Image (spheres, rainbow, N blue to C red):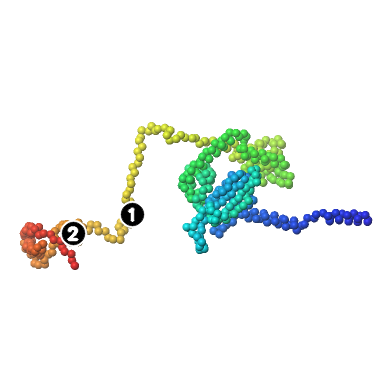
Amino acid sequence: MREFHNAVDEIDDEVDGLEVINSDVFESAGLEEDMRKRMLKNLNKKVACSSGEVHIKSFFVGQNFKIKKEVKEHIKLLAIHSKRDLHIAKNEKIRVRVVCRGIISGTDGESDGGPSINSKVTCKGKKESCPFVIQISRSNEVEPWLVKTVNDKHLCLKTRNVKACTSKFLAGTLLQQLDANPKIPVTAIHDELQRKYELGLSKMKVFRAKAMAKEQIFRRHCIVQKAIEKCIGTLTPTATALVYSIKEEASKYKAIFCGSDKYQVSGMMLEQFVVNLREKTCTCRYWEIIGIICKHAVCAIWDKILNGENAQEPEQWVHPCYRLDTWKAMYFNKIDPINGRSMWPKSVCPTTLVAPKHHIQTQKKKRRRAADEPKNQTRKLSRKFLTVTCGKCHNKGHNSRTCKGQGGPRQRTVVGSSQGVGGSSQVGSSQGVGGSSQVGSSQGVGGSSQAAAKARQKIPFQRPRARG
């Protein structure tokens, strides 16, 4: 018994010499790891600013990129979405540095709180420069690119003239749209891109982007046709690789026939599914949603073939859209090239095509009035069909501008006795230039009217003096 206690004491001494893990330190390390994950999640989280806009953080510290082309694409997207003039200051094999060359609004030494237009300085100098900078580098040419420095604060103004928004970039965004609707006009594409990016895009740039997108679609059709000619089998290359991986996983399952083309498929991890080959369904719903046969259905088909029943291979149970014949039918129609306009054949039509007459309308057409609408809608009454009275000679038929003594001098009738038929009426005297002359009496019907007319012709015309 004494030996047993001595042995236990030796074991306790050995245990005291071992390094024991401190549980408090272990728990604190776990908390730091959780805090680090939470910070990384917040960096990638979309946060709305005071104006309600969501600014996407394209770069964050610790972000990895496989190739340099991917880095430049992210820089271009950041410049377009943020509407800033970003520039790659250093473009080396192991280092890329991005700065902002926007326009800063200064205050000219006055702290009035508002920007001054006269003190705009481009972000090229050291004193007046935007603090935005992104540093991406790698230790050697084999390792991936790592974002090490990110300062996304801007002091410059936003711009609508972003150099990163080129026609090549716009062409990449128009591929699907032109593939579905090749005849879409340039104006419609221009309006859509203006609303999407809110940048100053010219119609010529959009036109070039459309032409480049059509050329890329044409090249893609040629590439796909070459790939189709090399394919062997019943399915497309992507579907063939996917079915092959499904077959490898199907070997881990076991199927039990339950009648009416229904099978109970179970796996190693107590998984169990029901497959109905007659309706082509499985309770995992992979077959119904994607259209490619699932691993449980492949196991049921193999069990059916092993029992001597007629069943097609798993490739024949795939939806027709994944078959090679459907792929060939989609690209059967080819885009034929055409010659230039100088090589077009001349028309033998005897009819001469004449350009339509172009009439330039100088006056504005009157609109068609309604039946119940009055014709005259002016504020003044029309003077049409009214006799004009001259303001100089007070005779009718002309005005003062065209007055040349038409109609003779103004005649005034002297109130006196007027005789009847065969009588005479006395007309008042009309003064001439140097004196006055009295016209004799003019008789009525049958009187001496010819003498009065002759006497009237001999009287010289005198313009009336202005009154007042």
Instruction: Kindly tell me whether residue 329 is visible in this rendering.
Output: no
Q: Where's residue 232, x and y in %?
A: 62, 34
Q: Nearer the viewer, residue 220 or 151?
A: 151
Figure disc tally: 2
Residue in the image at 9% along x and 63% along y = 434
The residue depicted at 49 percent of the width and 57 percent of the height is: 119
Q: CA distance from mark 2 to mark 1?
A: 36 Å
In front: 385, or 282? Answer: 385
Q: Position of residue 38 (x, y in %)?
A: 66, 55
Packing grade of label 1 (10 A; few <14, some 14-19, many >=20) is few
The first of marks 2 and 1 along the sequence is: 1
Q: Residues within 10 Å of mark 2 (few under 14, many from 20)?
A: few
**Relative to the observer, which residue lies in front, 447 or 219?**
219
- Position of residue 397 relative to residue 171, above or below, is below
- Please, what is the three-letter code of the amino acid marked with disc 2? Lys
Residue 10 seen in this snapshot: yes
Q: Which mark is residue 369?
A: 1
Instruction: Label 2, secondary structure: give it.
Output: loop
Q: Residue at x 15, y 61 (%)?
A: 463
Looking at the image, residue 398 sits to the left or right of residue 373; the answer is: left
Q: Position of residue 299 (x, y in %)?
A: 70, 40
Instruction: Measuring from the top left, give residue 81's x and y in whole percent.
Output: 54, 51
Q: Mark 1: which amino acid?
A: Arg
Q: Are marks 2 and 1 in contact (CB under 8 Å)?
A: no
The quarter holding residue 6 reads: bottom right
Q: Nearer the viewer, residue 417 or 68?
A: 68
Residue ID for mark 2? 396
